[in-house]
């Protein structure tokens, strides 16, 4: 069993294959956190320490006992108003205007299978793969109840956390802060790894010691954002890729969020992750419920590589869904960098003919096919086909492209609207704007109010009318600005709008994949502005970044790999000079970098030489040869490209019989030293043969010393080596 409750000690123990999570109901009904780490048996309440701490208040129940205080005890649900002055997970504004809540234990239930959350994405599992623990807590004064939800997936070393807040009192309350997960550590020195960035340079790795005071990351943008990713790692300070203890917290949510890490006055560490509390004040009338989006937790004592692999496997097999969850994705050519908004049906067909000749499998028609969309200042919201621009119906265009042996895909930006559009002129109140104020524009566009069902329904119906016109097998779902002016004319309580917006988005996406179960959805928000676990529930791949420069992508994909499977990473070969950086890199290097994800192209084949076209054919052949390994193999980071001269990574099959190693030289200097890349995850005491050179290598030496990268003149060379284990 994954979940055990000791009635005698009132201790809950959650076991996975390699980890144990433990908590205790104390004599006053508080739920105290005891342990999270390597799998172990026994009762860890001996870790609790009690002492008279100055200026640390005591609950009234404790009477004259000054040694008991929530200000230093480790907790599962720290709340404002209990004498704990550290950052709380929950803040409630009560009916009388007071702030505070004091949740005490009421009972529990253990269920077979994994809980799901109405209207929200979450990890899923079959009945035999998971268990659910529900712990019921109540504020006796206000009758507000909270159900803590724990999902345990033993085989995958995953524990998930969520909560349901229910107002069982008589008047309206407001939920002012709601974090899904809190981890309290009574000892240890830790580093916080977070993933910061900007548009076209997302998920850079930052590792800093957890010091006194609070370190806060998050997004106020209504999306998970380019600026910070909703995934955090807490690692012991000596933890490396291959050794040491570390914890990951990943938020299964795509909107504004807040993550906090804090060392307190007694050198204890607290880390929390959940909803942003800015512009958040969610009303709950009597009898109403609120669900906190889920956080996924995993632990490794074998370093960061194992931690990432835990997340990769779980997300790939128990978060992504649909036809393409386990399938190798089609190699596609996207029209954006080939023609931007300047195309016709004839030029799209010509692009498709070239794609078919080069061995590609799908043609994607990007922005510019709808309404009067001849530039990016107009027509968002007018989701009808511009047949005058195409010179034919969409259905006929798709038939011609399918006739070439290609699948057809199309771009949408359903959440946005231009003021210069038929939809805005008819329904200006459907945009998120504040009455009496000029709205904030970004890319000359506004955002539709997806917290309103009438708005969601209209856009959904408009989109379906397009999708029903032909055999459309792929949709790129984009959002090219952050949310602002979060005011809805559909409610009086504006503190609920950003959360309800996400419910509207998730409802739209769920309806879409139910209606079109064979559709491949790729998420995008200016590239990687909404690359999060919440979107993976609906879109099994996400455009990693609008920056397709091969060298920058090495860094971006490196940071992404800490929390997300590479099968989810949309990665394309683009033209040079690169459209985002102006850098010129070898065609081979661009291919090697893009093969670390869902592979495709973003260029105009008419501008390529015959030699480059032949190289594309060879790249596609190689990708297809290794695609299954890239899709489901164990991923290892072999170097840190932010500090080393080469960026290198590796895919290894589960039985260690196949190994694909890729490396990109990031620097070139005079009299260059040799870079040795150490392989990982091989079977010891055996031999591996490299496919192109046919050389045999001893596995122990490959892992202990590595393989030398050739020293060559010229910039940015790349190398790809495929090894197969020799049978003994």
Image (cartoon, helix red, strand yellow):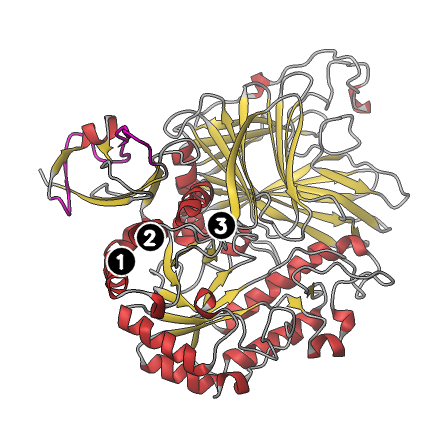
- The residue indicated by pointer 3 is 113
Q: Nearer the viewer, residue 108 or 219?
A: 219
- The residue indicated by pointer 2 is 595
Q: Nearer the viewer, mark 3 or mark 1?
A: 1
Q: Residue at x 56, y 50 (%)?
A: 199
Q: Nearer the viewer, mark 2 or mark 3?
A: 2
Residue furthest front as drawn: 670
Q: Residue at x 34, y 75 (%)?
A: 406
In the picture shown, does residue 524 fall above or below 265?
below
Q: Residues within 10 Å of mark 2 (few under 14, many from 20)?
A: many
Residue 310, image x, y percentages = 41, 40
Residue 575, image x, y percentages = 39, 59
Left or right, 378 with respect to 640, comes to right
Q: Residue at x 78, y 62 (%)?
A: 433
Whether residue 259 is in magenta: the answer is no
Between marks 2 and 3, how big is the CA–CA gap? 36 Å
Q: Residues within 10 Å of mark 3 (few under 14, many from 20)?
A: some
Q: Nearer the viewer, residue 663 or 406?
A: 663
Whether residue 680 is in magenta: the answer is yes
Residue 594, image x, y percentages = 36, 53
Residue 535, image x, y percentages = 53, 56
In the picture shown, does residue 211 fall above or below 260?
above
Helix, strand or loop: magenta stretch: loop
Label 3: which secondary element? loop
Contact between labelled residues 3 and 2, with CB atoms less than 8 Å apart: no
Q: Nearer the viewer, mark 1 or mark 2?
A: 1
Contact between labelled residues 2 and 1, with CB atoms less than 8 Å apart: yes
Label 1: which secondary element? helix
* Marked residue nearer the N-terminal end (3 or 1): 3
Q: Which residues are magenta?
A: 668-693
* Marked residue nearer the N-terminal end (1 or 2): 2
- The residue indicated by pointer 1 is 619
């Amino acid at each position: 069993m994954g979940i055990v409750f000791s009635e005698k000690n009132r201790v809950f123990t959650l076991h996975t294959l390699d980890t144990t999570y433990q908590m205790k109901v104390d004599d006053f009904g508080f739920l105290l956190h005891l342990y999270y780490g390597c799998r172990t048996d026994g009762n860890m309440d001996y870790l609790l320490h009690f002492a008279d701490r100055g200026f640390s208040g005591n609950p009234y129940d404790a009477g004259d006992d000054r040694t008991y205080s929530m200000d230093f005890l480790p907790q599962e649900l720290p709340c404002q108003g209990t004498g704990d002055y550290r950052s709380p997970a929950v803040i409630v504004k009560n009916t009388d205007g007071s702030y505070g809540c004091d949740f005490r234990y009421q009972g529990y239930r253990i269920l077979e299978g994994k809980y799901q959350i109405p209207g929200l994405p979450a990890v899923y599992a079959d009945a035999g793969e998971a268990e659910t623990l529900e712990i019921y807590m109540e504020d006796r004064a206000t009758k507000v109840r909270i159900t803590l939800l724990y999902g345990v997936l033993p085989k995958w070393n995953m524990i998930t956390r969520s909560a349901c807040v229910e107002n069982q009192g008589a008047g309206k309350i407001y939920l002012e802060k709601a974090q899904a997960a809190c981890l309290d550590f009574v000892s240890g020195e830790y580093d916080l790894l977070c993933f910061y960035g900007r548009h076209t340079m997302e998920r850079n790795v930052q590792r800093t010691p957890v010091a006194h005071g609070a370190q806060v990351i998050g997004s106020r943008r209504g999306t998970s954002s380019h600026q910070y990713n909703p995934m955090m790692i807490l690692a012991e300070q000596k933890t490396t890729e291959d050794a040491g203890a570390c914890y990951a917290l990943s938020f299964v949510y795509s909107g504004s969020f807040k993550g906090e890490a804090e060392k307190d006055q007694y050198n204890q560490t607290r880390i929390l992750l959940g909803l942003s509390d800015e512009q958040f004040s969610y009303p709950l009338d009597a009898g109403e419920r609120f669900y906190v989006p889920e956080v996924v937790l995993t632990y490794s004592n074998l370093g960061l590589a194992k931690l990432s692999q835990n997340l990769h496997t779980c997300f790939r097999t128990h978060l992504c869904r649909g036809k393409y969850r386990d399938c190798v994705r089609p190699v596609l050519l996207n029209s954006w960098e080939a023609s931007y908004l300047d195309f016709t049906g004839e030029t799209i067909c010509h692009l498709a003919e070239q794609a078919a000749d080069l061995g590609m499998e799908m043609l994607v028609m990007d922005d510019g096919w709808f309404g009067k969309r001849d530039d990016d200042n107009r027509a968002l919201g007018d989701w009808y086909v511009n047949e005058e621009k195409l010179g034919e119906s969409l259905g006929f265009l798709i038939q011609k492209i399918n006739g070439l042996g290609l699948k057809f895909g199309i771009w949408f930006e359903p959440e946005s609207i231009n003021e210069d559009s038929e939809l805005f002129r008819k329904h200006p109140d459907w945009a998120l704007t504040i009455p009496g104020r000029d709205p904030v524009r970004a890319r000359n566009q506004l955002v539709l109010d997806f917290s309103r069902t009438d708005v969601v329904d209209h856009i959904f119906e408009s989109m379906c009318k397009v999708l029903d016109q032909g055999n459309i097998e792929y949709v790129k779902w984009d959002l090219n600005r952050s949310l602002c002016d979060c005011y809805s004319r559909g409610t009086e309580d504006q503190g609920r709008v950003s959360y309800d917006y996400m419910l509207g988005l998730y409802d739209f996406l769920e309806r879409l994949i139910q209606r079109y179960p064979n559709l491949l959805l790729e998420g995008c928000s200016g590239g990687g502005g909404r690359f999060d676990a919440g979107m993976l529930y609906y879109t099994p791949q996400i455009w990693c970044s609008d920056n397709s420069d091969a060298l920058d992508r090495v860094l971006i994909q490196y940071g992404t790999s800490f929390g997300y499977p590479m099968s989810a990473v949309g990665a394309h070969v683009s033209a040079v000079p690169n459209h985002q950086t102006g850098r010129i890199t070898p065609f081979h290097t661009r291919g090697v970098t893009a093969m670390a994800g869902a592979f495709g192209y973003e260029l105009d084949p008419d501008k390529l030489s015959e030699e480059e076209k032949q190289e594309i054919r060879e790249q596609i052949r190689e990708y297809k040869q290794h695609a299954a390994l890239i899709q489901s193999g164990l991923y290892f980071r072999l170097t840190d490209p932010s500090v080393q001269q080469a960026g290198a990574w590796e895919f290894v099959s589960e039985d260690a019989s196949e190994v694909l190693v890729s490396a990109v030289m990031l620097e070139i200097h005079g009299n260059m030293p040799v870079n040795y890349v150490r392989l990982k995850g091989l079977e010891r005491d055996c031999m591996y043969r490299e496919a192109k050179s046919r050389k045999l290598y001893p596995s122990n030496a490959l892992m202990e010393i590595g393989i030398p990268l050739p020293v060559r003149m010229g910039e940015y060379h790349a190398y790809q080596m495929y090894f197969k284990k020799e049978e003994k």
